[in-house]
Image (tube, rainbow, N blue to C red):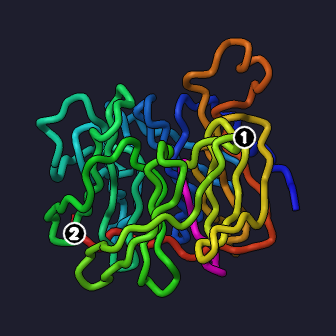
Amino acid sequence: MNSKAELVLDSQALLGEGPIWDDRRQLLFWVDILAGKLHAFDPARNENQAFDIGQDVGTVVLTESGPKVMLAVYKGFAAYDLETEELSLVVHPEAHLPGNRFNDGKCDPNGRFWAGTMAYSDQKDQGSLYSLDSDLSVHKALDGIAISNGLAWSLDGSLMYYIDSPTHSVATFDFDLDMGAISNRRVTIQVPEEMGTPDGMTIDEQGMLWIALWDGGLVCRWDPENGDLLQTIDLPVSRPTACAFGGRELDTLYITSARTGLTEELLKEQPHAGGLFAIRPGFCGIPTFRFAGQI
Ligand code: CA
């Protein structure tokens, strides 16, 4: 079944990323990494609020702490107060690697904040994957990563799914929910090169994975048990970046996209590149996990 996502916000983002649904505020948070902006989109009012973070911002996650969200910015893990608009750096595990920045990240079912890094140069093997515990200690889980992207956990919390984009695949790890440890890496889904490069990812209530395909103009639903492609959503832009379920019933799939790197010619063909798109694909998501740390 093919279906098409519709533009909901003509945001013209350089590198829109990291959509995440806040069920308490009924807002979709997302970031424009290269513009250094955090965004909050209110679908009921069709309004978007932008927060200037002052440095590249790879991803955003929710917290249990009133007005604050957590970010993974150029200078590491940070808390951001939506009311005072104050950024507080928490810990920077790559202060010695100025050529790297944080990229995609999510919270696991126990409230640890996982986020990975990549080199600005896209040079391979420069990135790592970290987890920030609720006690604000940081742990390196993987190194030798090229472009750290999609993260999701199986519905029972026993598996972690992960995308290092240039591998064109989704890796599955056994996940120790109590310890936050990953082991036994294996390839679960191989994405054919002609479909684009796997980028951001989310999971639905049936445990199936939705993956944005950069330069593929698609978001696809896959079965992580057997690697089967189940459903395809077309976009009017070539660089979708990430997706997340939102809305009161978690039945709307929101999709971010990018303008960066597209030629003038391509931008003329896809004037809404960098926009926020949405579709009701016939499946629902699961509630967003929040960061458990006190910040
Ligand atoms: Ca990404």
Residue 272 appears left or right of 104: right
Q: Residues within 10 Å of mark 1 (few under 14, many from 20)?
A: many
Q: Where residue 222 appears, x then y in whole percent?
A: 67, 66
Q: Nearer the viewer, mark 2 or mark 1?
A: 1
Label 1 secondary element = loop
Residue located farthest toward the top when viewing the structure as drawn: 264
Q: In the picture shown, does residue 118 fall above or below 44?
A: above
Q: In the picture shown, does residue 251 fall above or below 216?
A: below
Q: Where residue 185 appears, x then y in whole percent?
A: 38, 68
The magenta stretch spans which residues? Answer: 199-207
The residue wearing badge 2 is 133
Would you say residue 206 sits in the magenta stretch?
yes
The residue positioned 52% from the left and 82% from the top of the image is 155
What amino acid type is highlighted by mark number 2? Asp
**What is the quadrant of residue 9 in the picture?**
top right
Q: Earlier in the sequence, mark 2 or mark 1?
A: 2
The residue positioned 23% from the left and 63% from the top of the image is 132
Q: Where residue 71 appears, x then y in whole percent?
A: 34, 51
The residue wearing badge 1 is 217
Figure quadrant of the N terminus: bottom right
Residue 78 appears left or right of 153: left
Discs 2, 1 touching: Cβ within 8 Å: no
Residue 282 appears left or right of 209: right
